[in-house]
Each structure stands twice: as C-alpha cells, then as structure tokens.
C-alpha cells in the first residue's frame, strides 16, 4: 500500500523533547499545514482520497486511528506518538476515527487546497482507480 511510517527526528532532554520536521524529514515540498483538534471521540474525519497530494499525519497529542484503503486492501494504523507520522501518498482513501480526548492531528501536505484533487465518494474512488 502506498503509505509509510516516518520517524520524526527528536532531541531528548530531561526538560522535554523536541521533534523536528525539516526538508529532509519528508519527501515533498511543504505547501500547506493544518491541524485537527477538539474532535469528538465518535466523529470520523477524512473520508476522501487525493489524486495528486501527499500528506504526512502526525499525532501532536493523544491518539487516533487512520484507516487506509487502496480499493483492494484495508489497514488500520493507530497514531499515538508525536515522533511517528504516517505518510499517505496519492490515490489512497483515508478515514480518521477513534480520537482520544485532547487529540491533535497535524497534517503536512504537498499541495494547496484544490477541490478537484479530492475524491470524496468511495465508489467514485474505485471507479477512478479502475476497480
């Protein structure tokens, strides 16, 4: 599947750790950054695929599950460490669920918001892939 767990470099210190995202951390140029927060535990976010954009999801606080699907295989990845991010490449369906209290999901994207890059219906997604 077109995903990858990325280890975010960190500096450990008795006063607290620092995680560092630099150009060498992710395999694309950063064009947009946003974050999800105050999400009810029963809510689901995502529910789309990108034709071109790549995204790196990092759990800054708390935990949540990312359900990825390539039209043939489905996989659930729990993100709960702020030094581990999930790189979701293009043409992968994603849904985020099971948010813990206080969860914050940072999303670093290779593209600016362009509605035409989104596929928001799973049947249309499968058609787009030719499945």
Image: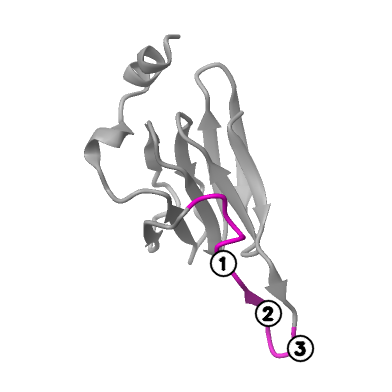
Q: Give x and y (percent) for residue 94.
A: 46, 36
Q: Give x and y (percent) for residue 71.
A: 50, 19
Crowd rating for badge 2 (residues with CA inside 10 Å; few <14, some 14–19, many 20+): few
Instruction: Look at the numbered disc 3 and give the secondary structure of its residue.
Output: loop
Q: Is residue 73 above or below residue 52?
A: above
Name the side, left or right, on which 24 lies relative to 124: right
Please report the residue visible at 36 percent of the width from the left and 17 percent of the height from the top. Answer: 128
Q: Earlier in the sequence, mark 2 or mark 1?
A: 2
Rendering colour mode: one colour
Reading the image, the residue beneath label 2 is: 17
Segment colored magenta = 13-28
Q: Is residue 117 above or below residue 20?
A: above
Please report the residue visible at 43 percent of the width from the left and 57 percent of the height from the top. Answer: 30
Q: Nearer the viewer, residue 32 or 72?
A: 32
Q: Which is more foreground, mark 1 or mark 3?
A: 1
In the image, which disc is placed on residue 22?
1
Magenta residues, dominant SS class: loop
Name the side, left or right, on which 26 lies relative to 130: right
Specify the quadrant that holds the N terminus: top right
Reading the image, the residue beneath label 3 is: 14
Please report the residue visible at 46 percent of the width from the left and 43 percent of the height from the top. Answer: 54
Instruction: Look at the numbered disc 2 and give the secondary structure of its residue.
Output: loop
The Cα–Cα distance between marks 2 and 1, rounded to whole angstroms, is 16 Å
Instruction: Look at the numbered disc 1 and give the secondary structure of its residue.
Output: loop
């Amino acid at each position: 599947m077109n995903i990858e767990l990325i280890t975010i470099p960190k500096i450990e210190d008795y006063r607290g750790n620092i995680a560092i995202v630099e150009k060498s951390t992710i395999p694309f140029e950063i064009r947009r950054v946003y974050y999800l927060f105050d999400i009810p535990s029963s809510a689901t976010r995502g529910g789309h695929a990108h034709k071109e954009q790549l995204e790196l999801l990092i759990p800054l606080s708390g935990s949540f599950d990312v359900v990825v699907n390539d039209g043939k295989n489905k996989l659930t990845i729990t993100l709960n460490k702020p030094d581990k991010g999930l790189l979701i490449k293009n043409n992968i369906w994603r849904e985020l669920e099971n948010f813990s209290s206080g969860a914050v999901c940072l999303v670093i994207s290779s593209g600016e918001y362009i509605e035409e890059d989104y596929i928001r219906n799973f049947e249309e997604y499968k058609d787009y892939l030719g499945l």
